[in-house]
Image (cartoon, helix red, strand yellow):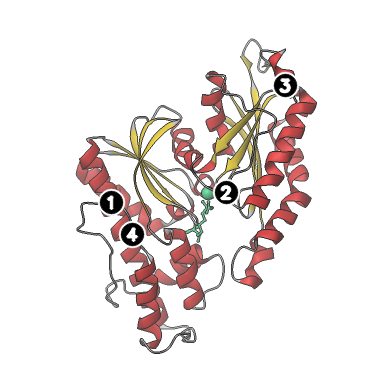
Amino acid sequence: MRLFYPWQRREVHPVRTGGAVIVTLFLGLETSCDETAAAVFDDTPAVRSSVIASQTDLHARFGGVVPEVAARAHLQRLLPVVDEALRRAGVRLADIGCVAVHHKPGLIGALLVGVSAAKMLALALGVPLIGVNHVVGHVYACRLAAGRDIFPCVGLVVSGGHTSLFHCRDPLHLDLLGATLDDAAGEAFDKVAALLGLGFPGGPAVEREAAVGDDHAVKLPRSFLHDERLDFSFSGLKTAVLYALGGQDNARPSPPPPGKRRADLAASFQRAVVDVLVAKCRQALRRTGLTRLAVGGGVAANQTFRRALEEMTRAEGAELFIPPLSLCTDNAAMAALAVEKWRRKEWAPLDLDAEATFAG
Ligand code: KG4
Ligand code: ZN
């Protein structure tokens, strides 16, 4: 059966804003994990509005994201979030000239909500649909925040699902330099937070606890630190925290009480993660000869990590691009990567699929 693509008949859908300036407005959707988000941006690209409805409250009592709960919450919240994004941007749905959606990677049921809504909106409005890889979007968040070209650059995406280093030739062409062989950095933060009884989400909780601890107090491993490879491994670090808590024979030690020991463990763990991430970025800069580093994803919100990156890039004579906190964790503004595809007319068919993995 031949699918009907209404935008094949209509080339552009510009709106006039502020007198003579004609721009195309985009609506971006994000539902890859536990944030329901929508954003309005233009083809500059400049962000007009970005609305994020976090589901933290729904998942906290389970100690982690429950995929079914996430998908159902996206279903309830997505359209109100879209309405709010349009309202804050001061535009109507009819002004939207392109719909962009993060269609991979992520939780499949969660992604499907955004993908289905995006298809429906594109079809109803008769405008192009564009599929965006949200991990590549995490690097593009740095471009958005910078307000200028940042490519070519080394890109590091550190989130709950990914820890990957790229040679980013341009916004859409990324060569993988290395990735985690087991847990992602954010996942390690979440698991160690659970071990320490700090709750969910783990990253910010560990960061708060670490602020009052001594980061040299507990000796913890740093995998591949002196290795040529640009890969990562964090599961040994997590196990080392477990052993530090209860010894090797205690499979499920109870979380430590609030106090110096707990804070020292949090600080030492955070320092170990930061040391490895920063060292691999330095290695990637030296190996590629690139002088720009872009860092995105939820873990890039960590202040100790940001400071260490600033120090390292200064010493290396490299430029650091790291977005403000609201553009580090999942959001729909980074779907502005769609502008790059739109310029190349890389539009998605109406049978665009949600995909759980990065590749494909
Ligand atoms: O990019 P993101 O919002 O979602 C994914 O695509 O996974 O990243 C979420 C991850 C979680 O594992 C969370 O614990 C971590 O980012 N995170 C942090 C901080 N804020 C969020 N990790 C360390 N320090 C933080 N301040
Ligand atoms: Zn993400």
Marks 1 and 3, Cα distance to the nearest angstrom?
Answer: 44 Å
Residue 5 disc label:
3
**Disc 4 packing (10 Å; few <14; some 14–19; many ≥20):** many
279 over 57 or under it: above or below = above
**Disc 3 packing (10 Å; few <14; some 14–19; many ≥20):** some
| Mark nearer the N terminus (1 vs 2) | 1
Marks 2 and 3, Cα distance to the nearest angstrom?
Answer: 25 Å
Q: Are marks 1 and 3 in contact (CB under 8 Å)?
A: no
Label 4: state its secondary structure.
helix
43 over 358 or under it: above or below = above
Q: Residue furthest top?
A: 20
| Mark nearer the N terminus (1 vs 4) | 4
Q: Which residue is mark 1?
A: 280
Q: Position of residue 194 (x, y in %)?
A: 51, 74
Q: Which residue is mark 2?
A: 356
Q: Position of residue 198 (x, y in %)?
A: 52, 74
At 72% across and 33% down in the image, what residue appears?
119
Q: Could you tell me if residue 49 is visible in this image?
A: yes
Counting every numbered tag in the picture gives 4
Residue 147 disc label:
none
Amino acid type at image mark 4: Val
| Mark nearer the N terminus (4 vs 2) | 4
Amino acid type at image mark 2: Ala
Marks 1 and 2, Cα distance to the nearest angstrom?
Answer: 26 Å
Label 2: state its secondary structure.
loop
Q: Which residue is mark 4?
A: 274
At 73% across and 40% down in the image, what residue appears?
116
Q: Position of residue 177 (x, y in %)?
A: 32, 43
At 77% across and 43% down in the image, what residue appears?
79
**Side of 58 relative to 157 (left or right):** right
